[in-house]
Amino acid sequence: MILPIFGVGQQGKSPTVTAQRHLNLYAEVVQDADKSGLVFYGTPGTTLFTSFGDTPVRGALAVGDSLFLVHRGTLWEVNNAGIQTSRGTLNTSGGRVDMAFNGTQIGIVDGTNMYCYTVASTTFVVVASGLFSNPVSITYQDSYFICSFRNSQRFQISAQNDGTTWDALDFAAAEAAPDRVVRVLADHGEIVLCGETTIEYWGNSGAQDFPYANIRGATSEFGLAAPWSLVKFNDSLAGLMKNRMGQVQVMMAVGHALQKISSQELDSIINGYVSVADATAFSYLLGGHPMYQINFPAAGKSWLYDGSTQMWSPLETGLDGQRHLAEICVDYLNKPRVTDYTNGNVYILDPNVFTDNGTPIARELVGKHLLKDYDKSEVFRLQVDFETGVGLILGQGADPQAMLQVSKDNGHTWGNEMWTTMGQIGTYLTRVVWRRLGTARDWLFKFRITDPVKVVITGASVDVAPSYE
């Protein structure tokens, strides 16, 4: 019989509650539930677009037909063929940079200086005067560049439509609490000032002396726990937040309020990490699924949130349980381009690619607990409905394999690996079946695929009967 053994949960505090896991998979709800109401697909792989060598890219921004990246101490312009052209030199060579575009100029801040690159004339300058020291964050709104600064409550605006000109009197300070502004970002026509314990919203009032004013009553009592976790997401903002009660949560802005999008199980996991202040994130759209990926460098872990199903899934590159390779993402020519956190590679994120630049991607799915009145039951046959016949012509994946492990003790330990074929290329009638799995009071099934092939899982059929042992 067909049983709903797959769900969208995530193991956290106890596998006895749920042991579900969806490694490098995302779910899709089928509207008319043709064959199944819930289907799992493999997350995108990566192919090399261009490379800057052995150290990571520091920041990226797409402008028209060009991709601008900062690597070490150089601003590079890259075209759609991956050809690199140097456009300017920064005074620093390490650490993340923030970038913004005002229609004619690109503003860059690196925690020490601001730089301004004019696209039409290809001129690059270091902003010399008027701007406060140590700018760490930059955004653009209503014809102004806006900067925030290290260890400061202040933000400052540029002259209109000119990132090279700043007045030392054109600044204001966050007012709701004496916390430092760690990130400034424009959203829905407002400036969002993200502090350590509060978030304020400022709007353009049209005043002559200083155009921005605090929007009273809009302050949130949550602060930004990791500056680089805040990104535009699904017509809003999302990031890792924290309030005065303590632990962190991933939250999304809904108007001037924050809505928690991390599950309680995920909260339990990430609050167990040694450090979360270094978390980074990015977002992209995948076939109608708004995706938010958050990386925890100190913990070596990555998580993917699907805004359409609210499902969280771990992401890994390789077979050793390490975080996903992607660090910074920008949409360039309608394709997500991601940088590598270990080197200067820039990749295309592609759902039709099944490795990370040649490195294997493991797909793993742990289903729901299968119980029958808490009595012993026997499983005679388990069939999983994979998309079969997806083998490659040659090499690894020519005869792709699916692995099953069974747990009979609530997910605390797992039995032997049992492998079976998913079908060589074109053998679409292949059935993925395991038989005579024994008896248990509680069943958990773990499936794993490491071959570089398309992975689609639509459901499972289990032949189960009471055991009279």
Image: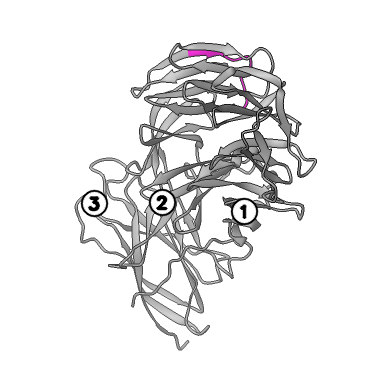
Q: Which residue is mark 1?
A: 258
- Disc 3 crowd rating (10 Å Cα; few below 14, some 14-19, many 20+) is some
The one of 80 and 445 positioned closer to us in this rendering: 80
- Disc 1 crowd rating (10 Å Cα; few below 14, some 14-19, many 20+) is some
Cα distance between the residues tagged 3 and 1: 49 Å
Mark 3 or 1, closer to the camera: 1
Q: Which residue is mark 2?
A: 289
Q: What's under tag 1, amino acid-wise? A: Leu
Where is residue 417 shown, x and y percent of the image?
A: 44, 59
> In this rendering, is residue 362 above or below 76?
below
Q: Is residue 276 visible?
A: no
Q: Are marks 2 and 3 in contact (CB under 8 Å)?
A: no
Q: What's under tag 3, amino acid-wise? A: Gln
* Sequence-first tag of 2 and 3: 2
Cα distance between the residues tagged 2 and 3: 30 Å
Label 3 residue SS: loop
Q: What segment carries the magenta color?
A: 87-95
> In this rendering, is residue 317 above or below 385?
above
Instruction: State the residue at coordinates (57%, 47%).
Output: 238
> In this rendering, is residue 290 above or below 403?
above
The one of 91 and 148 positioned closer to us in this rendering: 148
Q: Which residue is mark 3?
A: 424
The one of 35 and 466 positioned closer to us in this rendering: 35
